[in-house]
Amino acid sequence: MFIKYDEYDLLELFQSEPVSISGNIDDGELIYTYKDDQNFKVILT
C-alpha cells in the first residue's frame, strides 16, 4: 500500500531536508529523519 504525502508537510514534520536513497533526489526515494533532545527518533522511508 502506498500513501502520498505532501512534501511541504513532511518538511514541517521532520524539520529537515530528506536524504536520497539512490543518490538522485529527483527519483523520489527519500529518507526523512527526526531526532529530538530526549533521543526520540522517527524515520520515514
Image: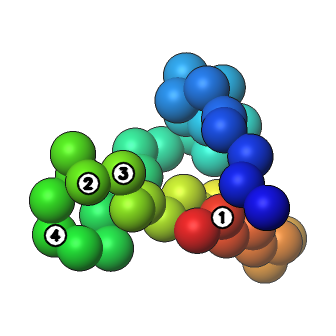
Q: Pointers 3 and 2 in contact (CB under 8 A)?
A: yes
Q: Are marks 4 and 2 in contact (CB under 8 Å)?
A: no
- Left or right: 13 with respect to 33? right
Crowd tier of the residue under label 3, counting other residues whose Cα lies within 10 Å: few below 14, some 14–19, many 20 or above:
few
Q: Left or right: where does residue 6 sit relative to residue 29?
A: right
As helix, strand or loop, the secondary structure at mark 3 comes to loop
Q: What x and y, as percent, mark residue 32?
A: 54, 58
The answer to which quarter of the image holds residue 26 is top left
Tell me how far mark 4 sits from mark 3, CA to CA: 10 Å
Mark toward the start of the polypeptide (2 vs 1): 2
Asked whether the residues under the numbered discs 4 and 3 touch, taking CB atoms below 8 Å apart as contact, a structural biologist would say no
How far apart, in angstroms, are the residues tagged by discs 1 and 3?
A: 13 Å
Secondary structure under the numbered disc 1 in the rendered image? strand
State which quadrant residue 37 falls in. Answer: bottom right
Please tell me which of labels 4 and 1 falls first in the chain: 4
Residue in view at x 30 percent, y 64 percent: 20
Of circles 1 and 3, the one toward us is: 3
- Above or below, 16 against 42 in this view is above
The alpha-carbon separation of the residues under discs 2 and 1 comes to: 16 Å
The residue drawn where x is 26% and y is 54% is: 27
- The residue at which mark 2 appears reads as 27
Quarter holding the N terminus is bottom right
**SS label for mark 4:** loop
